[in-house]
Amino acid sequence: MALPTTYTQAYGQLGEFFSKIRDAQAPDKFTLQILKDLGYKSNNHRPFIPLMKSLGFLSADGAPTQRYHDYRNHSLSKKKMGEALKEAYSDIFLIKEKPTNSDKELILGKFKSYHNASDNVARLHVGTFYSLLELADLETKPIKNTPHHDIEKESEKLEEREASDKIKLLGLHYNIQIHLPATKDVEVYNAIFKSLKDHLIE
């Protein structure tokens, strides 16, 4: 369970900021100078760096993580932000799986109680969270890895189907001759035909 302590008064600019880091080359380390070079020079922008660390975009020493690099792929950015939010704000998602604007007061109360925060600070937390939420896709689910032995089984089944299809295309036919024993016991014949049905027909 978690709720980050980081928030920013400039949460209205988070969308623009993450768009810029997505389109710019990833630095070796994300420093205050990099932040300024991107155009964010106010003290209100400084919390962007610890916020990125809370979201798993930066390591403790400020180096971009794999999530940061994945986020730069436009086709993955919303999914990666969704994953980051679910990890960093997991306590909120325990309350609401898909938070909407109507849940803001509920989430405000959660921040107040969790951090023992004032109304003003809690509202900045909420503003930060909802600004990030606009950049995220919460619908995507991680691809389930298929165990190796399951892949082998599927491969064997496919090969069997292909072999069967080839036989059908070749038009092969089998003629089976059965020599019945001379007996008046009907049950013997019943047993033979039942065995044929079980092993040949089905």
Image (tube, rainbow, N blue to C red):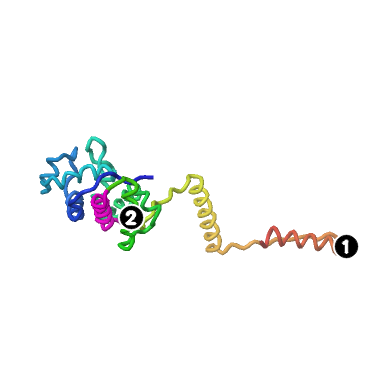
According to the picture, the residue beneath numbered tag 2 turns out to be 107
Q: Is residue 129 magenta?
A: yes
Q: Amino acid at mark 1?
A: Asp
Q: Amino acid at mark 2?
A: Ile
According to the picture, the residue beneath numbered tag 1 turns out to be 185
Residues marked 1 and 2 touching at CB (< 8 Å) = no
Tell me the tag on residue 28: none
In the picture, the quarter occupied by the N terminus is top left
Up/down of 100 relative to 49, above or below: below
Please, what secondary structure does the residue beneath circle 2 have?
helix
Residue that appears at 34% across and 59% down? 99
Residue that appears at 33% across and 60% down? 103
Residue 109: give x, y in percent of width and height: 33, 53
Residue 122: give x, y in percent of width and height: 27, 51
Say left or right for 134 vs 196. left
Q: Which residues are magenta?
A: 118-136
Give the label, 1 or 2, closer to the camera: 2
77 vs 37, nearest the viewer:
37
